[in-house]
Image (spheres, grey):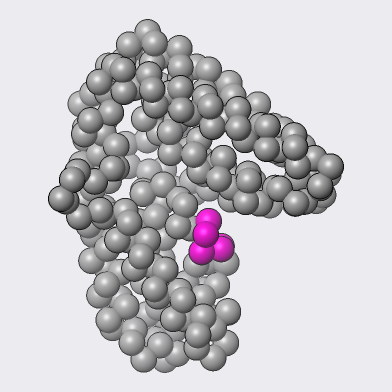
Amino acid sequence: MADPYIDQYETIAYGRFAVSQILSLLVGLDFELDPFIKTIAARLAADTDAMEAALAKAGALEGVTYKAPPGKPDAVAEARDALRRVVRYAESRRDGAALAARILLGQSLTTVLRRRPVKLAAALGLAIDAIDANKDQLPEHEAFIKDLTAARDALSDLNEGVRKARTDRRKTTPEVTAARGAWLRRYTSTKLIVEGILKAVDRTALLPEIFDDLAEFHRAPGVSDEPAEPT
C-alpha cells in the first residue's frame, strides 16, 4: 500500500516517477497487457495532475516545489547533468559497464536520474564514494568528485529549503485533502496491480525501481513513517 507519510507535495514527484517507470519498464514485458498497463499509467498520471491542480488552486505550490525560478540555476538539472557526464565517461573506459554499475549501485542511469531530488542527492554521495574507491580506473577522478560534490551540496541546500517551506505551509484545504486521498487510493491500487503483473513474470525486484517510496532505505529529511496529521 502507499506509505502514509507521502504528503500532499510529495504525491506529485512519486506519481510522475511511477508513471514514467511503468511505461519504461513494464511496457513490452507482456504485449497482450500493454494496453492495460498504459491505461493504469494514464489514470495515475491523471490523478497526479489533479493533485497538482488542487495545490495550485490553493496557492500551495510556490516555494515548495523544485522548479527553478526564472534566471536562477536549476540545481536538479545540474545534478543530473553532472552524474550523466561521469557515468557516460566511465562507460567509455576499460570494463566501463562494470565501473558504471558500481557508480550507480547496479541501477540504470535512467532510473537514478528520475529519482526525487532527495534520493538524487543521496545517489550523488554514493557515486562520489564509488569514484574514490575506483580512482585508479578514472584518471579524472578528482575533477569528477569536485563536480559531483558541488552538485550534491547545491541539491542538498535546495532540499533543505523545500523541506522547510513545506513544514511551514503544512496547512491545506478540503480540496487538497480530497485530492490527496484520491491520489493515495490510486497509487495503492496501481502498486498492487503492478506487483501482480511482475509476479507473473518473476520480476518483482523491479518494484523499488517503479515506486520510489519502496526504495527509501533511509528516511528522507522531513519525512516520517507516521500517518500525516489532519489539517
Q: Residue at x 46, y 28 (%)?
A: 49
Is residue 62 in sight in this rendering? Answer: yes
* Residue 117 drawn at (x, y percent): 36, 49
Task: Give the vertical position of 128 relative to 56 (above or below).
Answer: below
Is residue 226 in sight in this rendering? Answer: no
Q: Quadrant of residue 85?
A: bottom left
* Residue 216 drawn at (x, y percent): 49, 46
Quarter of the image that includes the N terminus: top right
Q: Nearer the viewer, residue 112 or 225?
A: 112
Q: Which span is picked out in magenta?
A: 107-111
Dominant secondary structure, magenta: helix
52 left or right of 157 in image: right
* Residue 25 drawn at (x, y percent): 66, 51
Q: Nearer the viewer, residue 49 or 216?
A: 49
* Residue 50 drawn at (x, y percent): 46, 22
Q: Nearer the viewer, residue 196 or 227?
A: 196
43 left or right of 14 in image: right
Q: Residue at x 19, y 43 (%)?
A: 69
Task: Give the vertical position of 155 relative to 128 (above or below).
Answer: above
